[in-house]
Image: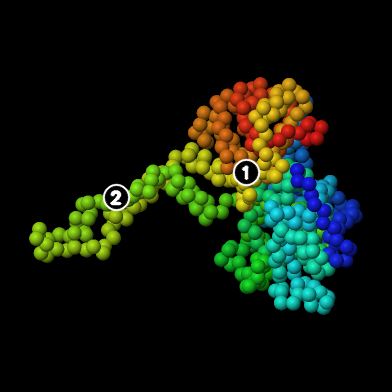
């Protein structure tokens, strides 16, 4: 994994870019519709009318199930997962108190700032100048707008010129660089792999945030350190009604929104917000770190654009494949009727005839005439592609871009087959999914990883599910599947060579 840079600053210059020990509290405060309820750890938030105000996060209770050969599989609570999906998913926000009560941020604010200095990592600084109380700090604003956006990568001096309060640092795709952050996604296995976008980590000083806004994706907001106030609505805002502050690089709702709920989150608490639901988070102290787990569904406009690109490249034979004219149609309308010598002709070269339109329409329909299996194979490639621009097509980290030799990969698979205590792990930020043979229209299941397809053989039952269902593929389960699937060893060698799977020892997995 990436070795994190540490950016340290003198106390007082950065408003708190130093890791702080967050005092663990045994009581939680939940502000719900202007009513304050004190909650014991593990208790339930219940309103005055007896209606439960919060849910239980399905990934909180990971159930351990023993596998053959001594392995252990950790999965979610099925009952809680169904309740969440039926009652809240893409319907309304819900707060999970103590969702991950034992979670501790694997990186400090200083280390997050170090990541923001890396050239290949997307990062932003957002300053809310209007939120500052000090006249001295307001004087620093100069000609800046009320919300200022600064784009990384940064250098250390960039952090020394910040106000004491009201700013936030946001770093995208931290799960692709820090293994412990990638492991956080194991708590969300009740949702499809291909929907998981990234884990964005933010640090904010008191008053810091990105303003009232809406997202076009589902998001789980995990409070990792410090405290943050969140306001949400139950009414979605469609793009046409998204009234933003003009001449502002930050997408802030100009008039805010009608607040339905207000919550105060402490370490371990998590808020789920569906797409297009307005929300606004504000840090309550100088040690606030929030992990945002985003789940992005395909955008219809981009979906159609990508699909048409596929059709152009794969369904049209060449540039000379054009729409044909109907000669009878030309004779009847364009040339027109009348005598052969042309007298009395009703020629109408300006008309676009119904038959010409139909011919073009037939051509389009022929191109669009994909069977269900072919469309499924295209869609699987599309949804497993990395969702953000990366320096390489597989989105692999620097140290694993070096292809593992085939002989080395073969040796690793041989160790697994011998029961030597070797497991394999998904490359961080890689998207693993698969199509069943029935859906793909193939002899065996088809595995898809970051837009690449890996067809499996007809005797590969269970292979794709095993490879996709968990981030760490334990040696015992792999050993069993090597005995059951005669082509599994070749698949593992290929994925190891490509850097999509890498070797870990069972004691470290």
Q: Is residue 409 at least partly visible in the picture?
A: yes
Real-space Cα distance between discs 2 and 1? Answer: 41 Å
Quarter of the picture containing the N terminus is top right
Location of residue 416 with respect to 399 vertically, above or below:
above
Disc tally is 2
State the mark number for residue 394. Answer: 1
Crowding at dot 1, Cα within 10 Å, few <14 / some 14-19 / many 20+, comes out as many
User: On the image, which quarter does residue 63 sit in?
Assistant: top right
Residue at 73% over, 24% down: 415
- Which residue is labeled 2 in the image? 324
Which residue is at the front of the view, 222 or 503?
A: 503
Question: Visible in this render: residue 229?
Answer: no
SS category of the residue bearing label 1:
loop
Measured as percent of width and height from the top left, residue 166 is found at 79, 67
Residue 227 numbered mark, or none: none
Which residue is located at x 44 percent, y 40 percent?
Answer: 371
> Where does residue 93 sit, x and y in percent of width and height?
70, 56
Viewer-nearest residue: 79 or 390: 390
* Image coordinates for residue 172, horizontal then vertical, percent: 70, 54
Looking at the rendered image, the disc whose residue lies closer to the viewer, 2 or 1, is: 1
The residue drawn where x is 69% and y is 29% is 408
Position of 39 compared to 249: left or right?
A: right
SS under mark 2: loop
Residue at 59%, 38% in the rendered image: 448
Q: Residues within 10 Å of mark 2 (few under 14, many from 20)?
A: few
In this rendering, the answer to whether 305 lies above or below 463 is: below
Name which of mark 2 and mark 1 comes first in the sequence. Answer: 2
Q: Is residue 135 above or below residue 398?
A: below
x and y percentages locating residue 326 in the rendered image = 25, 51
């Amino acid at each position: 994994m990436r070795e994190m840079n540490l950016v340290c600053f003198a106390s007082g210059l950065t408003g708190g870019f130093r890791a702080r020990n967050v005092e663990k509290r045994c009581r939680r405060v939940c502000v719900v519709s202007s009513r304050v309820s004190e909650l014991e750890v593990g208790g339930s938030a219940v309103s005055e009318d007896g209606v439960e105000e919060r849910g239980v996060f399905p990934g909180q209770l990971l159930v351990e199930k023993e596998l053959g050969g001594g392995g252990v599989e950790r999965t979610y609570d099925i009952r809680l997962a169904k309740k969440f999906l039926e009652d809240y998913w893409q319907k309304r926000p819900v707060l999970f108190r103590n969702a991950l009560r034992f979670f501790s941020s694997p990186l400090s604010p200083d280390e997050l700032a170090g990541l923001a200095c890396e050239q290949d990592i997307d990062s932003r600084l957002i300053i809310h100048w209007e939120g500052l109380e000090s006249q001295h700090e307001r004087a620093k604003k100069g000609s800046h707008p009320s919300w200022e956006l600064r784009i990384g990568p940064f250098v250390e001096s960039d952090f020394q010129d910040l106000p004491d309060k009201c700013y936030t640092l946001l770093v995208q795709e931290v799960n692709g660089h820090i293994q412990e952050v990638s492991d956080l996604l194991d708590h969300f296995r009740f949702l499809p792999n291909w929907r998981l976008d990234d884990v964005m980590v933010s640090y904010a000083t008191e008053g810091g945030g990105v303003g009232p806004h809406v997202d076009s994706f589902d998001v789980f907001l995990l409070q990792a350190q410090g405290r943050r106030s969140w306001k949400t609505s139950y009414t979605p805002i469609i793009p046409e009604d998204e009234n933003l502050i003009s001449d502002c690089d930050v997408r802030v709702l100009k008039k805010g929104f009608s607040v339905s709920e207000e919550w105060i989150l402490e370490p371990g608490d998590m808020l789920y917000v569906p797409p297009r639901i307005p929300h606004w988070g504000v840090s309550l102290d100088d040690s606030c770190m929030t992990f945002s787990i985003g789940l992005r569904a395909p955008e219809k406009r981009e979906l159609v654009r990508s699909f048409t690109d596929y059709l152009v490249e794969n369904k049209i034979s060449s540039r000379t494949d054009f729409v044909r004219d109907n000669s009878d149609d030309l004779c009847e309308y364009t040339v027109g009727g009348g005598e052969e010598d042309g007298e009395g002709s009703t020629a109408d070269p300006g008309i676009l005839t119904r038959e010409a339109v139909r011919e073009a329409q037939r051509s389009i329909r022929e191109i669009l005439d994909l069977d269900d299996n072919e469309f499924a194979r295209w869609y699987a490639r599309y949804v497993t592609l990395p969702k953000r621009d990366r320096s390489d097509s597989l989105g692999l980290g620097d140290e694993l871009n070096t292809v593992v030799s085939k002989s080395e990969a073969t040796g690793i698979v041989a160790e697994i087959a011998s029961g030597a205590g070797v497991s394999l792990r998904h490359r961080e930020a890689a998207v693993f999914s698969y199509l069943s043979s029935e859906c793909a229209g193939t002899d065996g299941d088809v595995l898809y990883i970051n837009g690449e397809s890996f067809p499996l053989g007809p005797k590969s039952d269970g292979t794709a599910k095993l490879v996709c269902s968990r981030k760490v593929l334990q040696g015992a389960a792999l050993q069993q599947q090597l005995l059951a699937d005669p082509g599994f060893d070749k698949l593992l060698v290929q994925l190891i060579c490509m850097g999509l799977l890498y070797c870990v020892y069972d004691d470290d997995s």
